[in-house]
């Protein structure tokens, strides 16, 4: 068995308008505090929590957030070292850093590499300033190209960018420009996520007030088909619903999620999955630290999946992948339902597997709902 | 005060008809009938002041809340005339005040010799009151015109006295002026009832004949039948017989209402009271029927008996399918007290199991539904009401259609629809508007009269289907609420009617079929297909929605296939959240009905078929369930 690690860094300098992730600005955590103050013992807490994890060899580590690149590389390196020392890393262990393209320098990037990182993912979101403004992002789109080049020069073997589509006011042409801009970079991997307007976000409030219109599903569908087409044309193969990569550059950490592998999430609000048991930590960094430092488990809730739930989940997760679902694992009534979808061009059969077509990927949840649950 | 204590007053079964006056009060809702009745109970002292409560005679909650009287009741009031000083017995027979209950009103009127025409002197007479007034005049009742609410600052007694005088052919100064609220003029009114209304006449020695003018189910006592004795005598322990059915019962108890039931030694000529036989179902004791005695039966029934005939049909379905047995039981129970209510099980592809119910009219329908929901805690969806059609096929076969989905597909020769004679009263400034509305609704004008210098009575024949649709709402909104409407059945007429089917993916959906005038079929089709396009979610394939008359498509829309239904990201491996979301969405899907291959949410059926109130209710239920 192996065990992947997700390390959550719950800090941002500013919260973006669309974001509902478990992240906090220093001021939200403590009046007038700086990042250094609020995060000073954070790594200690993470290392403390690490003691509870099973001791299995580690094939992937992913630092997400928040903005992990806000913390000094050496701090993040302490976590990598501790995991290496305690669990051991596989020879080709993938260690990813989510980074803000604005704040990287050649020096910093070199330091990340020294501390063990070998994969970096930049939050690009869009190449269009007006789209970034709607998303409430602060970065300058030109910084992305600079950051990618610096990362490559520093020696990162695998570089990814994240894009968001369906932002209010974003046209199909805007999106095409963003995708083409991303594909013109020296990258190996692209994630393209449809914008989800989450309740409670600034963006949701703006839409409610009528400042923006809700993203349109048909337009988003066109955008998805476009990014798929442009990526494939440039040699980036689709391998998971929202991810395309050059051969051998698939994000193995993400694949571990979809393949229902074991992983441990370190940090507040982080989710874990170990052998059919899912659990997640308390959300607030202060509550998390308090528990961990007083040797109390930070787990807020857990659930043990029934065999039925596990079966459903493997369909829900597996169908998103390039390899699709194995036909022999499906029940006759499920195949019957899938028959209609096949007639309508949403799925295809390839050897012994059911695969989603590009239009089918767009209604993956619907298909999953019908054949499971 | 000229009240007489009950003990000293003339007793039931021993009261000379010459001392009896039977009267009713004809009034519109909210013109103050119940308040006046309360006042009469008070000054005759049949209800002690400390026991008095507002709207004393209105028994059901719904009646009290909505200020309307559904069931009539009769109260025996002893009174010493302030004019001649003699003792009298006044029987006040309450009448229902709504268009749906014209037949019941007519039976109440038939039990009286006179009527108090009560009009709010701030509002003037309303159409329903006028209709009932005409009914009373046809029955040769003595009419005593009374202006109520003279205490109101905006009262216009002179204006409305002139109006009443014109209508009934008296002098304006003949109109009495009372205030039910303060009691002003009520004693004088009682005196005038004695002075003007004739005493009942009848043959005490003839075989008994008593008119049933109301019949009420009581959970403890069974059916309580209200009667007016015309000839002869009714006594307790006697075998009585229903003329229409020949069924025999024992009169377990005979009595009068004063205003609580008091058993008596019997009821004589001209008297009004109740009898209890132990039957459990009002249909065995029908309004308008004649009661006679088994040992000495009459040979001639009293005139005017009719079977109640449902005019409006609607499907009632429980929101929660599991409540179907509760609904059945509730209807069974309600029917014990409502001879006009008919129902039979119905199953709809869309709404599941329910009942097709027949009602006297829209108010009757609303009351039944409200009672089902209130007294039996049911959550109901009712389908759009429709009338009864008589369809004659080319081969001469006749089919009675109470549900549009039963409209025959074959060669239809003629369709007959019910027609009503309607009376609209309104300020004259709205004549044009009203005529326009009636014309739109296929009305045929019968006549128009000014009832005062600025108010008119307009008479139209209208298809009942048009009234059932939304005529009354339209009339009210187009006349700023000033117009009032009354209608009565007037047989059938041939109509250029067609059934419009709504097809999803080329399959007709029974619940959406409607019978409409050919000229309005297109508008209905466009409206319904448009509505459904908004209500039905996108499916994995394109769904055409069509409206058709037979095989001819008259309107079409289409629901485009769904393009996107996926959450792209899993936040930090939060698979549980995603799974739960799918589970929840799946729950929502269970409320979908499969119509052919198309999933239609129950909301769509409700929104397309039912009233706004239903839609709100479904929304609230969804919200509570989330």
Image: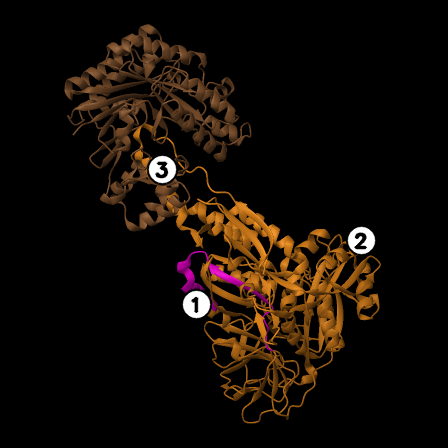
Chain colours: A brown, B orange
Distance from disc 1 to disc 2, alpha carbons, whole Å, reads 50 Å
The numbered mark, 1 or 2, whose residue comes first in the sequence reads 1
Question: In the figure, B528 relative to A65: above or below?
Answer: below
Q: Is residue B91 visible?
A: no
The answer for which chain carries disc 2 is: B
If the image is split into quadrants, where does the C terminus of chain B sit? top left
| 10 Å crowding of disc 2: few (<14), some (14-19), many (20+) | few
Q: What secondary structure is marked by label 1?
A: helix
Instruction: Report the chain holding disc 3.
Output: A
Disc 3/disc 2 C-alpha distance (Å): 68 Å
Mark 1 vs mark 3: give the one in front: 3
Q: Where is residue A101 drawn, in percent x and y?
A: 39, 14
> Pointer 3: what residue?
A356
Give the residue displayed 47% in from the left and 32% down from the top.
A222
Q: Nearer the viewer, residue A1 or A206?
A: A1
**In the rendered structure, the residue with mark 1 lies on which chain?**
B
Q: Position of residue B405 (x, y in %)?
A: 54, 63
Quadrant in which residue B485 is drawn: bottom right
Look at mark 2 in the image and give the residue it sits on: B429
Residue B510 magenta-drawn?
no
């Amino acid at each position: 068995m192996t065990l992947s690690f997700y390390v959550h860094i719950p800090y941002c300098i500013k919260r973006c308008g669309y974001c509902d992730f478990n992240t906090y600005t220093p001021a939200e955590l403590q009046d007038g505090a700086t990042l250094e103050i609020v995060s000073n013992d954070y790594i200690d807490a993470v290392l403390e929590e690490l003691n509870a994890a099973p001791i299995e060899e580690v094939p992937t580590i992913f630092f997400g957030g928040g903005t992990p690149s806000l913390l000094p590389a050496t701090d993040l390196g302490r976590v990598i070292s501790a995991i290496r020392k305690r669990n051991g890393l596989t020879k080709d262990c993938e260690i990813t850093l989510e980074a803000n393209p604005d704040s990287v320098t050649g020096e910093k990037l070199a330091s990340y590499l020294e501390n063990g990182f070998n994969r970096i993912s930049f939050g690009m979101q869009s190449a269009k300033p007006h789209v970034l403004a709607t998303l409430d992002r602060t970065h300058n789109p030109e910084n992305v190209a600079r950051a990618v080049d610096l990362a490559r020069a520093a020696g990162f073997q695998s570089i990814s960018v994240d894009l968001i589509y369906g932002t209010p006011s974003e046209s199909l042409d805007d999106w095409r420009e963003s995708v083409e801009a991303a594909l013109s970079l020296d990258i190996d991997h692209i994630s393209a996520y449809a914008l989800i307007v989450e309740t409670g976000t600034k963006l949701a409030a703006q839409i409610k007030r009528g400042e923006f219109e809700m993203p349109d599903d048909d337009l988003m569908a066109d955008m998805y088909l476009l990014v798929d087409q442009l990526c494939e044309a440039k040699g980036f193969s689709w391998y998971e619903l929202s991810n395309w990569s050059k051969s051998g550059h698939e994000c193995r950490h993400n694949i571990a999620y979809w393949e229902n592998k074991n992983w441990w999430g370190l940090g507040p609000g982080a989710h874990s999955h170990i052998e059919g048991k899912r659990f997640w930590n308390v959300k607030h960094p202060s509550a998390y630290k308090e528990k961990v430092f007083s040797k109390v488990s930070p787990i807020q809730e857990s659930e043990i999946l029934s065999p039925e739930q596990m079966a459903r989940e493997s369909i829900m997760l597996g169908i998103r992948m390039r390899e699709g679902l194995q036909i022999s694992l499906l029940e006759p009534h499920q195949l019957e339902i899938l028959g209609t979808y096949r007639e309508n061009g949403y799925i295809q059969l390839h050897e012994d597997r059911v695969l989603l077509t590009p239009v089918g990927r767009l209604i993956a949840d619907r298909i999953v709902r019908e054949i499971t649950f | 005060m000229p009240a007489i204590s009950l003990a000293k007053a003339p007793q039931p079964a021993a009261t000379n008809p010459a001392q009896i006056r039977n009267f009713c009060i004809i009034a519109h809702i909210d013109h103050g009938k119940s308040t006046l009745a309360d006042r009469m109970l008070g000054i005759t002292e049949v209800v002690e002041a400390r026991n008095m409560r507002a709207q004393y005679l209105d028994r059901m909650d719904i009646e009290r809340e909505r200020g309307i009287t559904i069931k009539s009741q009769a109260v025996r009031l002893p009174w010493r005339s302030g004019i001649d000083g003699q003792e009298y017995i006044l029987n006040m027979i309450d009448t229902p005040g709504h268009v749906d209950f014209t037949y019941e009103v007519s039976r109440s009127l038939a039990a009286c010799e006179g009527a108090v025409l009560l009009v709010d002197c701030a509002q003037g007479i309303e159409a329903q009151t006028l209709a009932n007034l005409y009914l009373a005049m046809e029955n040769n009742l003595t009419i005593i015109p009374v202006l109520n609410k003279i205490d109101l600052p905006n009262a216009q007694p002179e204006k409305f006295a002139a109006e009443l005088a014109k209508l009934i052919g008296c002098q304006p100064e003949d109109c009495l002026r009372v205030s039910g609220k303060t009691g002003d003029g009520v004693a004088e009114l009682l005196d005038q009832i004695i002075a003007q209304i004739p005493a009942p006449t009848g043959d005490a020695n003839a075989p008994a004949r008593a008119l049933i003018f109301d019949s009420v189910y009581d959970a403890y006592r069974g059916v309580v039948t209200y009667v007016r004795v015309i000839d002869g005598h009714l006594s307790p322990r006697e075998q009585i017989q229903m003329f229409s059915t020949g069924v025999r019962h024992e009169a377990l108890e005979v009595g009068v209402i004063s205003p609580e039931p008091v058993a008596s030694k019997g009821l004589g000529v001209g008297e009004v009271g109740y009898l209890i036989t132990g039957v459990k179902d009002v249909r065995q004791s029908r309004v308008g029927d004649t009661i006679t005695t088994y040992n000495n039966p009459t040979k001639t029934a009293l005139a005017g008996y009719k079977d109640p005939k449902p005019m409006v049909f609607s499907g009632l379905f429980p929101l929660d399918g599991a409540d179907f047995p509760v609904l059945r039981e509730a209807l069974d129970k309600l029917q014990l007290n409502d001879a006009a209510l008919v129902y039979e099980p119905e199953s709809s592809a869309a709404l599941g199991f329910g009942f097709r119910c027949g009602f006297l009219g829209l108010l009757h329908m609303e009351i039944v539904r409200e009672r089902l929901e209130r007294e039996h805690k049911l959550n109901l969806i009712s389908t759009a009401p429709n009338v009864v059609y008589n369809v004659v096929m080319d081969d001469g076969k006749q089919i009675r259609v109470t549900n549009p989905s039963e409209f025959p597909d074959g060669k239809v020769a003629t369709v007959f629809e019910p027609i009503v004679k309607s009376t609209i009263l309104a300020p004259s400034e709205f004549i044009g508007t009203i005529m326009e509305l009636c014309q739109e609704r296929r009305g045929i004008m019968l006549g128009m009269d000014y009832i005062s210098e600025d108010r008119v009575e307009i008479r139209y024949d209208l298809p009942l289907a048009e009234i059932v649709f939304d005529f009354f709402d339209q009339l009210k909104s187009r006349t700023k609420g000033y117009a009032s409407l009354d209608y009565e059945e007037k047989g059938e007429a041939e109509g250029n009617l067609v059934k419009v089917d709504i097809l999803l993916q080329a399959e007709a959906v029974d619940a959406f079929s409607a019978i409409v005038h050919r000229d309005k079929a297109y508008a209905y089709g466009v409206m319904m297909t448009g509505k459904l396009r908004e209500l039905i979610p996108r499916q994995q394939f394109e769904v055409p929605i069509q409206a058709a008359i037979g095989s001819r498509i008259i309107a079409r829309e289409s629901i485009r296939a769904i393009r996107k239904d996926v959450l792209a990201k899993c936040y930090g491996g939060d698979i549980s959240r995603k799974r739960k979301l799918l589970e929840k969405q799946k729950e929502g899907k269970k409320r979908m009905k499969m119509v052919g291959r198309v999933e239609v949410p129950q909301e769509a059926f409700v929104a397309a078929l039912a009233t706004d109130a239903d839609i709100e209710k479904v929304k609230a239920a969804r919200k509570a369930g989330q």
